[in-house]
Amino acid sequence: MSEAAGETEHPRLQRLLRYWDDKRGGRPMPARRDIDPFEIPDLLPHVFLVDVCHDPLVFRFRLAGTEVDRLFGEEITGKTTNEIKTVRLRQVIRKAYENVVRSRQPAAATTTYEGHNRYLVYARLLLPLSADGEIIDMLLGCMLWLSTHDLPPELRDRGRSDAGTRTRPGHTEAARPALIDVSTTASSR
């Protein structure tokens, strides 16, 4: 996957991006009321909605599918990003959400998360939603678990109180809405 803005290589994320693009019509982005869960039933375990509150900027998980909760290792519905247990993960997620709110564009990334003696690789798509067409009041997201690998024994239980994350941006092709570069690298080492 290229580091330039472009397409996500994951078919489910591509499908959700096309769905979002169809729902927005000629507008900059669709509203929450335009999104019908019955039209994307196979994605629901991987989908989450985040309320965006302004002044100050706060992100609260309105709902999360079962696979999203599994990725986080806890139920996140009703929690803010500030309540995510792992500091580095919390920082990476908040930065990605802020980038989407600021750019007003979709964003995709593949992220490697290190924690609990494992590497977890997942793909993420974030899509802005707006009730009035101006202020982003919600994010529609999708997370796909790609792979899990055990850490080598010499790297396990290093006494760290935190886990690390590394993010690689997605990209779209010209016919699709542009995805912003959400490239970040975080490590707790």
Image (cartoon, rainbow, N blue to C red):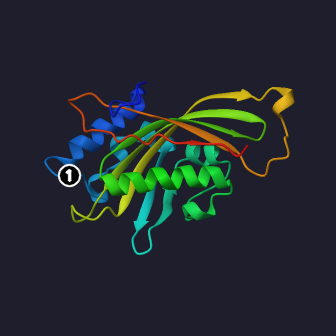
Image quadrant assignment for residue 156: top right
Measuring from the top left, give residue 44's x and y in whole percent: 46, 44
Q: Residues within 10 Å of mark 1 (few under 14, many from 20)?
A: some
**Quarter of the rendering occupied by the N terminus:** top left
Side of 54 relative to 78 (left or right): left
* Numbered marks: total: 1
Measuring from the top left, give residue 153's x and y in whole percent: 86, 28
Side of 71 relative to 133 (left or right): right
**Quarter of the rendering occupied by the C terminus:** top right
Which type of secondary structure does the marked residue at label 1 adopt? Answer: loop
Measuring from the top left, give residue 6's x and y in whole percent: 32, 31
Could you tell me the amino acid type at mark 1? Answer: Pro
Check the image and name the residue furthest to the bottom: 55
Image quadrant assignment for residue 185: top right
Measuring from the top left, give residue 120's x and y in whole percent: 65, 34
Check the image and name the residue furthest to the left: 26
Residue drawn at point x = 69 percent, y = 33 percent: 119
Residue drawn at point x = 31 percent, y = 58 percent: 32
State the residue position of label 1: 28
Q: Which of these two is toward me, 179 or 66?
A: 179
Residue drawn at point x = 33 percent, y = 39 percent: 179
Above or below, 161 against 83 in this view is above
Check the image and name the residue furthest to the front: 189
Above or below, 43 against 149 in this view is below
Residue drawn at point x = 82 percent, y = 32 percent: 155
